[in-house]
Amino acid sequence: MKKIIENTSHVIAHITMKLADGSAADSTKVNNKPAKIIMGDNSISPAFEQQLLGLEAGISKEFTLEAEDAFGESNPDNIHYMDITKFNEDAPAKVGNIITFTQPGGVELPGMIKDVSGSSVTIDFNHPLAGQAVTFVIDVVDIL
């Protein structure tokens, strides 16, 4: 009997993400380390889970999710401003840099520097793919 992905399955899969222009955003194939997806644990959107239900090991599927079902819309509350004196040679305030900030409680949160104006640095803590439709290519390796 073939195993298919169900609501409680643990899925081992390679995931490749592409942007609207077709360019690759990320892929687990780069380091040959497939992802483990635990269906029903709320770590992925319900729309993403729906795309996986019924797939079998060895199957590939490509689908596109709108921003709200992929990484969410860009949230203006996740844009913060810091004084340039908070940065140094190891973590320079340069547009495009992604710097990990340690939050209270030790949680690390990556933020991308969007702007440097005088002594003010604008940091975006939204997921880099927030606000964008994303095409996913799923290659199901195994179902546990």
Image (spheres, grey):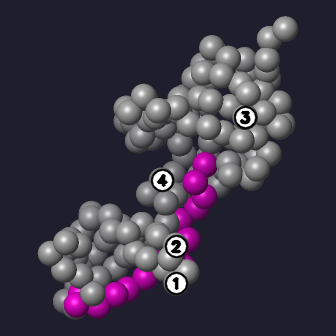
The residue wearing badge 2 is 107
Q: Position of residue 97 (x, y in %)?
A: 27, 64
Kindly identify which residue carries mark 4.
Answer: 129
Q: Which residues are magenta?
A: 70-85
Which is more N-terminal, label 1 or label 4?
A: 1
Q: Is residue 17 left or right of residue 138?
A: left
Of residues 4 and 124, the one nearer the viewer is 4
Q: CA distance from mark 1 to mark 2?
A: 7 Å
- Above or below for 12 versus 134: above
Pointer 1: what residue? 104
Give the alpha-carbon distance from disc 3 to disc 2, as whole Å.
26 Å
Q: Would you say 94 lies left or right of 10 here?
A: left
Image quadrant where residue 80 sits? bottom left
Inspect this view and state whether residue 51 appears: no
Q: The residue tagged with tag 1: helix, strand or loop?
A: loop
Amino acid on which the number 3 mark rests in the picture: His
Q: Are marks 1 and 2 in contact (CB under 8 Å)?
A: yes
| Residue visible at 62% across and 42% down in the picture | 65
Q: Which residue is mark 3?
A: 10
Residue 77 falls within the magenta-colored stretch: yes
- Tell me the mark number nearer the camera, choosing from 4 and 2: 2
For label 3, the crowd category at 10 Å Cα-Cα, with few meaning under 14, some 14 to 19 and many 20 or more, is some
